[in-house]
Amino acid sequence: MPFTSLGLGDDLLAAVADQGYHTPSPIQAQAIPAVLSGRDVMAAAQTGTGKTAGFTLPLLERLRAGKAASNNQVRALVLTPTRELAAQVAESVATYGKHLPLTSTVVFGGVKVNPQMQRLRGGADILVATPGRLLDLYQQNAVKFDHLEILVLDEADRMLDMGFIHDIRKILSKLPPKRQNLMFSATFSPEIRALAKGLVNDPVEIDVSPRNTTTELVTQWIAPVDKQRKAALLTHLIQDNNWFQVLVFSRTKHGANKLAKQLESNGIEAAAIHGNKSQNARTRALADFKNGKIRALVATDIAARGLDIEQLPQVVNVDLPNVPEDYVHRIGRTGRAGATGQAISLVSADEAQQLKDIERLTQQQLERKIVAGFEPGEPLPAAGALQPPKRKRPKKAKPAHARSDSSGGNGQARNGNGGGGNGQNRQARPANNNSRPGGNSQRRRRPAGNRRPQAQQS
């Protein structure tokens, strides 16, 4: 099936051809006609399969015929959980809409708000935004939604996670009830799917691959190693295999900074990217990584979504994530658009439970390979029989009076998207205390069922 059969105009087809694409991916082939029909859509597909174009192209097609936006009004709103993903979506809109007389802009936190307010004065046919900064702009009357026609939640599972749901509900309360709703994501947990259905009207559901699976194009294996030797093993792998581009995941901001310095001390050009870095520093580090100025980009899970790096050959998990779904997103940075890649996880004995949870979620056993010279003193348990994925208990909604206001008057949104140029964003806190070096290990903890969800950093 060629793109010409999907109902897109000639100018959009020309923009697609300019990018070298002629045949739509499975998610595009199903999503584009569904969106063009005007129906609400919930679409799940693995990362790297073209889902951004799956909503960008029909969004542009549907907006071409309407009246242009003006006076701070927005006709289509695309919400994303991170700044990097917002920038990527905005770039896609600009690329495919270059032959159309439509306007678009992007807003997110970590940078000055005044230039964004200036760009919104004339209105925007398409606005791509992170939730906190969008609420800040709305409170300052810099953006209006009276004429909104379409809402898109990109990475909907993260957007509707309990850490973001309060901001999302605030935004939804400002939008016209009559609108088209589109939700695109790599994964939809049962609880999130149930929650999403409460926000859409009789949606077309598209699922082009088994949920929470990893692409076959990525070779996955784990290297058992003692925790204190992970940095040395990473250095060895990069140098011994002559890797020139590797994306490295650390569980904490402090760990990312420390690891980048250790790599630099061993002659490997590296940079860290996380929520405490300014937006300019994050943008510069990503650009240097893409053009080959640095060999290793060390990131927290902020980079698991939205980093679009062509031909990325290696992803290394120095720490396994506490949330197994994040493993799927991390390794989805490689093996994109038909290219092959490999994902290596450096796993210490204290991460045996995280490994078990990942194998249970993805329903596959990861090959164990011990690297000579890095044999662990405490071996990992042998891979056992795969169990069915755990079914989580739905979380109880918090009373309205107990919910924190993430868009308080100071403009510092708790999810990290809100005003303030210092980019000091909160990151979801892992279950252990390793993310707070030098912190008080005796700090009293709430019982597991009563812990307050944390908004993910952006």
Image (cartoon, grey):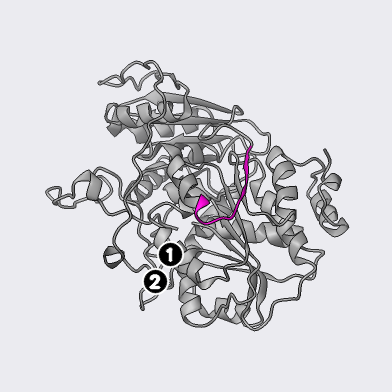
Mark 2 in CB contact with mark 1 (< 8 angstroms)? yes
Q: Which residues are magenta?
A: 197-207
2 or 1: tag closer to the N-terminus: 1
The residue mark sitting in front, 2 or 1, is 1
The residue tagged 2 is 407
Q: Position of residue 384 (x, y in %)?
A: 36, 16
Question: What label does residue 325 carry, if any?
Answer: none
Q: Nearer the viewer, residue 360 or 348?
A: 360
Q: Is residue 145 above or below residue 286?
A: below
Work out which quarter of the rendered image holds the N terminus and state it. top right
Q: Nearer the viewer, residue 137 or 435?
A: 137
Residue 129 horizontal/vertical position (percent): 55, 65
Q: Secondary structure at mark 2?
A: loop
Residue 267 or residue 414, whichever sits in front = 414
Q: Which residue is mark 1?
A: 167
Q: Kindly identify the residue that appears in the image at 66 percent across and 67 percent down.
A: 149
Q: Residues within 10 Å of mark 2 (few under 14, many from 20)?
A: many
